[in-house]
Image: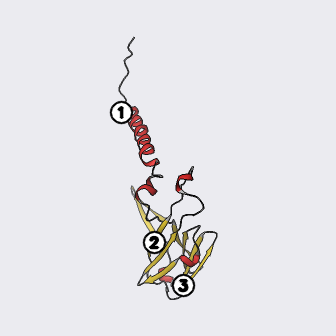
Amino acid sequence: MLAIRKWNPFRELSTMHEEMDEFFKKTLGAMGGLTRGFFAESWYPAMESFVREGNLVVHAEIPGIDPKDIDISIVGNLLTIKGERKASKEVKGGEYLLNEVCYGSFERTLTLPEGVKADNIYASYKNGILEITMPAEKAALPRKVTIDIEGGSEKIKKVA
């Protein structure tokens, strides 16, 4: 007996999503995944910047790279970090069972806020984290801004 089923667009989207996943696994999986298949020449380490004790601090996650192979430069208000993660010569490409590590060169550029004293820069490397520290004038440090929120006839102040 033929069952009549109500059409559900979400079921169709789910099916299409599963089919697209399978397509990418089959076509790009043989090349080592999307990032290595299309963008094998470069990768981008994760970065964060924050203020600590009156200094601007920049962290870049670059495990597996010799600190001697990292180039840090400042031109104007642009901080640039360059380097390269070289593939291990111990394992040949065809011998991998799983390879999610990106290899190749990278370059990251960060715009420094006004008031950062880039001429007094210090860099260190520990446990795969590059830390760059520069003194910052008070004007360059973050400050709280008051937001006025109007709700009906009353005015509420909120500090962000």
Instruction: Select label 2 or label 1 by which is in front.
Output: 2
- Whether residue 112 is visible here, answered yes or no, is no
**Mark before the other along the chain sequence, 2 or 1:** 1
- The residue to which callout 3 is attached is 121
Callout 3, which amino acid? Ile
Instruction: Give how far apart the Cα atoms at labels 2 and 1 are.
Output: 42 Å
Answer with left or right where residue 54 lies relative to residue 153. right
Report the residue marked by disc 1. Answer: 9
Between tags 1 and 3, which lies in front?
3
Is 84 or 87 nearer to us in this picture? 87
Helix, strand or loop at label 1? It is helix
Q: Measuring from the top left, give residue 22's x and y in whole percent.
A: 44, 40
Q: Residue at x 41, y 37 (%)?
A: 19
**Labels 1 and 3 touching (C-beta < 8 A):** no
Q: Amino acid at mark 1?
A: Pro
Above-or-below relation of 38 to 11: below
Q: Secondary structure at mark 3?
A: loop
- Residue at 53% x, 76% y is 70
Q: For residue 108, which numbered disc appears in the image?
A: 2
Q: Answer with mark 1 or mark 3, whichever residue precedes in sequence.
A: 1
| Quarter that holds the N terminus | top left
Other residues around mark 3 within 10 Å, as few (<14) / some (14–19) / many (≥20): some
- In 3D space, how far apart are the residues under numbered discs 1 and 3 (Cα atoms)? 56 Å
Between the residue at mark 3 and the residue at mark 2, the CA separation in whole angstroms equals 17 Å
Q: Position of residue 53 (x, y in %)?
A: 60, 79
What x and y, as percent, mark residue 61?
55, 67
Tag 2 secondary structure: strand
**Horizontal and vertical percent position of residue 17:** 41, 39
